[in-house]
Amino acid sequence: MKLNKKLLLIIIASIAVYSIFLILSDFNKLSEKFFDFKVEFLPIIVPLVTFGWLALYFRWTILLKNSGYVLPHRKNFQIFLSGFPLSITPGKVGELIKCQLLKENFGTPRKITAPIILVERLYNAVGIIIISIFGIWYFDFSAIVIMITACILTVIFIALRSKKLFTMLINKVSKIKFLSKFSDSFIDSYDVINHSIKPKIFIICSVLSAIYWILESIAVYFILKSFGIDLFEISDVILTYTTSIILGVASLIPGGIGVSEGTLIGLLTINGLTFSTAVSLTIFIRIFTLWYSVLVGFIALKFTGAFSLNNSTVQKNS
């Protein structure tokens, strides 16, 4: 099955999930809420989300440079954006297509780029933890989720800093049938992963990750403002939004679709919004924070020629 067909199936499934939320809400009230959106906020919301991507791109280039690869920005940025539509695959593993595109365009080996993409996922989580700590006392539920995530990340980073612990962890994971064929590749990639989390790189990449989440959370704050919602402080928005993302990622469901939306709707209703209002806000939040990037990424995929790749091409070893 080609890449575009897989993405089409995920998008169809996403539409089905959103349809369920629409059916469960009061459609008349929901349609009225959609028209409450003030378009004058678009020049604020869209740049905030877009500048957040630039923070992630700088992180991407730093990690590549740290592994000895300095690539032309124009093509590298296109390849970076090409990973966005694949963020709606389970656990964002579809972003590994960037490895194949880098190999075809620059000859960059997958044993270098694949672990960098894994490290990116870890830095995303670190960024969420950093900005969430500032308002952790607002929601007990969010505090529990964030603290559990922080503990898991601590264990992972300790394991990554010790080759012995890392090998033991991979050997345990390799007992899972689906992951067994990847165990040798992960062990071979240890040096790249370890080199990508050294103190200086860790600080820089963590700050860039935090900047990304801050900009996206501020965008969510202005989405609420665009509907005339003034019930939330920015710290409330950060915790509500990041909690929904953490649970969505943990579910391993493509793009966290359904889980992130359900969590966001639940947290918004707990804080006094009606179900219909929460649904309409959630849909707009996900349009700007997920589907906008997917759309831009689709355009980038076209320019990079990724649609011509099939499963066998993407899965070839370097």
Image (cartoon, grey):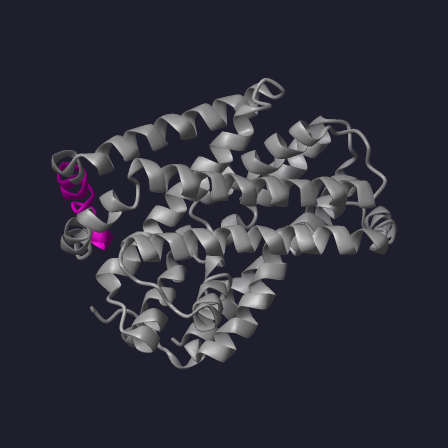
Q: Whole-percent x and y of residue 234? A: 69, 31
Give the camera-side residue of 36 and 127: 127
State whether residue 40 is above or below residue 314: above
| Dominant secondary structure (helix, strand or loop) of the stretch shown in magenta | helix
Give the camera-side residue of 304 and 14: 304
Q: Residue at x 42, y 41 (%)?
A: 204
Q: In the rendered view, does 167 fall on the left or right side of 101?
A: left
Q: Whole-percent x and y of residue 256? A: 51, 48
Whether residue 15 appears in this view of the structure is: no
Give the camera-side residue of 63 and 180: 63
Q: Whole-percent x and y of residue 55? A: 52, 50
Whether residue 27 appears in this view of the structure is: yes
The region drawn magenta spans 167-179
Q: Residue at x 87, y 49 (%)?
A: 36
Q: Quadrant of the C terminus?
A: bottom left
User: Residue 109's image quarter?
Assistant: bottom left
Q: In the rendered view, does 38 fall on the left or right side of 237?
A: right
Q: In the rendered view, does 33 fall on the left or right side of 152?
A: right
Q: Quadrant of the N terminus?
A: bottom left
Q: Residue at x 40, y 37 (%)?
A: 203
| Residue 158 is inside the magenta segment | no
